[in-house]
Image (cartoon, rainbow, N blue to C red):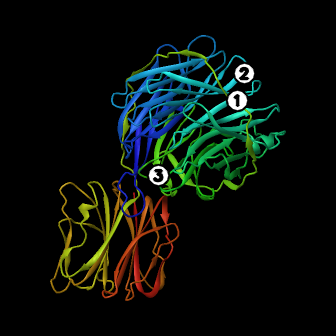
Amino acid sequence: MLTKKIMGAGGVGVESDDYWVVQVSDVRLLGDVLVNSSNDVIAAFGDAQAVAVVSLDKEGVENWQKKYVYSTYDSGGFKWIGVDSSDNIYISTAYNLGLGASFDIALFKASASTQAVLAQAGISSSSNDSPSKVSVDSSGNVYQTLRYNDGTVNTAGLAKYNSSLSLDWIYKFNDGTNLSEFRATTVDSSGYIYAGGYAKEAGTNEYRPYLVKLNSSGTVQWSVKTTNTISTTQDAIDYGGLIRDIIVDSSDNVYISIASTVSSFGVTQHLHVLKFNSSGTVQWHKQFSSTGSSPDDTSANLDMCITTGGVLVACWDDGTESPATTAVVGLSPSDGSVSWQRNIDRAHFSSIYAHPLGGWCFSIATYSSPYGGYIARLPDDGSLTGDWGNLSYNSSSRWTSAAGGMTWGSSSISAASDSPTETTPSYAAATSSYTITKPVSKGFVTKAVSDGSYWNSGNVLDVLSIADEGDLVVIAFSVDNSTTSWSWQGMSFTAIENLTNQASPGTYVGYRIVQAGDSNPYLGGSSFGLQKLTAIAAIFKPTYTTFENSGYSNGSGISLDPPSVTATAGLWIITGHLDDDFNSTFTAPSGYQLIGTAGDPSVGSGTCICYKQESLTSENPGAITSSTSDSWYAVTAAFS
């Protein structure tokens, strides 16, 4: 079952449901997520003996869902996915031929329109084979990273298939004696292919990160590895490991992530993110260290993306506290500096991908009963923290960043053509039973609009042009007359506070859940008494059904501490009014966001709305401040 928690972004001009979380029941770990050319979010998971695939639109609404079942034996391991320019999906997974070699490598193509399986390919060797990530170039060629046995040693491999999954070539990468493995691949704007993993050398823990750049014919352009001395377990964590992900930016700079392949119990765990230019020269290296109470374990994934807003977002399993969680950090691509850090209270094999319309998409699933997973789209500034249904996304400071100490040099490993046994799996699309529901739940402000300069009666705000049915609309306005008789026309609002008789000029604060048939509201009153007004409105999604408010507090000076509200709520709104002859600048209390202000020096009034999204049972917001001193008041409301 999929359940959707609807949220929107903070700030002006962001559409509803841009950011959301979907919960998926009955799926298991080892999944992957991407976004296709139609801005749909595609996630793949394990589901018992099948591959589960879910397609959601940009707002988290289901497009389709499907199971892909192998006819006889269990499907196991990761489910890596790629997509071509026609939105066909390629799934890299492991399956069991029943030949005594345990899992073998499978790759199949599913139709974007019908989700039917269009083509399949596979590879089998005498080893326990392992497929990994796939990438697709602009011509529809598919590149699959592999680990298989070449008859001598388990080796890293890279296979190229055409769009019909006919094998073009396979190259293996090892020194003829020691293990190697590829985990990650990507294609840059010029059609060059990158593959990365590790190449082991003679030492017990000497698993060296290995990165190679090839052209579409499989010719190596360059390859690099770490050159530091690796003799101890701590050395292996600081200078060794497996490349877990590779991405490129619009200038074809290359970013890799590295996590250790060795047991880290009793030593300090480090994770690594590095930037190379397209010639293979390191631009910067950031090493992450945990401050957790038991920094001895992390998982196999360290996924990355670069958002359209220019943020390098990385996520990894954080096993340094119990229970394990997922760490997410926002970095600057230019120098690797950390701009924010978050924690998600789920762990094990998270995946991340940039959304072309903004933000980043995320998937994760559990590895034991009760099974279930999540798909999300979140903003690239680290905002919208809080509880999203059963998933918590909050600020964190557990991991610290410093310059890393890896040194890199050319690798002597060359690419050798190979021809392992080809097989043809028999995956077929099957009907799935994942149900999507959209419960009403708390949300964030999605739009804020201010307007003013109205005389007598007239439209205050064109609410229906910015709000939809079921939205919560909060309006605060100031009128340049404290005694006039006025009323809402077209759409009534429930009063949080009516302060028109408490000060001159007065303020009204009200809310409404927009309903079908509503018309745009306007303010009606005495043609000589209403005079000039200013207004500000905030639109929240989705519906809020109850509220409690604190009344008003008169005050003077440059600050006012609104009274406390005792309620169980997820949204806290403060509206402040200042009898301000100078159109002051307002500052929100700590933890609150200022939506906007409406004021006019000739009117002598100012109004602000501040909000905070956080689950609390009571709240004393702290003081609203202004840039000038005057007589003013505020109201606080809690919505649930």
- Is 193 on the left-hand or right-hand side of 446? right
Residue at the spot of label 2 = 153
Q: Please provide percent x and percent y for residue 445.
A: 39, 60
Mark 2 or mark 3: name the one nearer the start of the chain: 2
For the question of whether residue 430 can be seen, the reply is yes
Mark 1 or mark 2: name the one nearer the start of the chain: 2
536 up-or-down from 135: above or below: below
Amino acid type at circle 1 is Ser
Q: Secondary structure at mark 3?
A: loop
Please rate how many residues cluster around mark 3, counting C-alpha atoms within 10 Å: few if below 14, some from 14 to 19, many from 20.
Answer: many
Q: Where the C terminus falls, by quadrant?
A: bottom left
Q: Tell me the quarter of the picture where residue 60 sits.
A: top left
Q: Where the N terminus falls, by quadrant?
A: top left
Q: Residue at x 63, y 14 (%)?
A: 101
Please rate how many residues cluster around mark 1, counting C-alpha atoms within 10 Å: few if below 14, some from 14 to 19, many from 20.
Answer: many
415 up-or-down from 629: above or below: above
Amino acid type at circle 2 is Val
Observer-nearest residue: 450 or 140?
140
Residue at the spot of label 3 = 359
Query: Label 1 to label 2, Cα distance in Å?
Result: 8 Å
Amino acid type at circle 3 is Gly
- Is 499 on the left-hand or right-hand side of 125? left
Residue at the spot of label 1 = 180
Q: Please provide percent x and percent y for residue 371.
A: 51, 32
